[in-house]
Image (cartoon, rainbow, N blue to C red):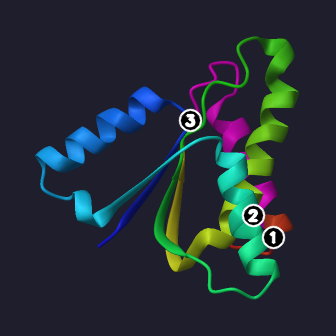
């Protein structure tokens, strides 16, 4: 019933807010403009200190392109693994994490391996 959006682009956040208003769902949406790493750090600190922390039924991981060339694939895969590992605790039991990749050199097989590896580190089922 509630949506939290984390987006680095101010223009995208503005568009999201306008769309939410046009669809009469603004009261059910939170927009955080900034780096997802900072958002994740805040959530990790909340968990570490025993504060009540958010968990979500659906989490969509849609980072920007991190591997534009074949030489960037290893670095890009490590980035995906890091983000997936850090996001996994935010997924409620029985929830879904959807991961997309717009980095052309990273294949679907590569991405699936990143997901399995990162979730394995966190002892979460893939």
* On-image quarter of the C terminus: bottom right
102 inside magenta stretch: yes
Residue 6 x, y percent position in the rendering: 52, 48
Cα distance between the residues tagged 1 and 3: 26 Å
Which badge, 2 or 3, comes first in the chain's sequence?
Answer: 3
**Crowd around label 2: few <14 · some 14–19 · many ≥20 (10 Å):** many
The chief SS type of the magenta part is helix
Magenta highlight range: 101-119
Find out whether the residues at labels 2 and 1 contact each other: C-beta distance under 8 Å: yes
Local secondary structure at mark 2: helix
Position of 30 with respect to 22 (left or right) is right
**Crowd around label 3: few <14 · some 14–19 · many ≥20 (10 Å):** some
Q: Residue at x 85, y 66 (%)?
A: 121
**Crowd around label 1: few <14 · some 14–19 · many ≥20 (10 Å):** few
Find out whether the residues at labels 2 and 3 contact each other: C-beta distance under 8 Å: no
Position of 9 with respect to 70 (left or right) is left
Q: Residue at x 72, y 48 (%)?
A: 37
Residue 27 x, y percent position in the rendering: 25, 64
Nearer to us: label 1 or label 3: 3
Which residue is nearer to you in this view: 47 or 77? 47
Q: Which mark is residue 122?
A: 1
Q: Which mark is residue 119?
A: 2
Residue 26 x, y percent position in the rendering: 24, 57
Q: Which mark is residue 8?
A: 3
Cα distance between the residues tagged 2 and 1: 5 Å
């Amino acid at each position: 019933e509630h949506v939290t959006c984390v987006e680095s682009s101010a223009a995208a956040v503005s568009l999201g807010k306008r769309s939410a208003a046009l669809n009469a769902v603004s009261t059910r949406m939170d927009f955080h403009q900034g780096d997802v790493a900072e958002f994740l750090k805040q959530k990790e600190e909340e968990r570490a200190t025993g504060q009540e922390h958010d968990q979500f039924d659906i989490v969509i991981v849609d980072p920007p392109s991190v591997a534009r060339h074949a030489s960037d694939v290893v670095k890009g895969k490590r980035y995906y693994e890091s983000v997936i590992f850090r996001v996994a605790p935010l997924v409620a039991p029985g929830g879904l994490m959807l991961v997309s990749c717009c980095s052309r050199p990273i294949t679907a097989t590569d991405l699936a391996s990143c997901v399995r590896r990162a979730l394995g580190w966190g002892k979460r089922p893939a």
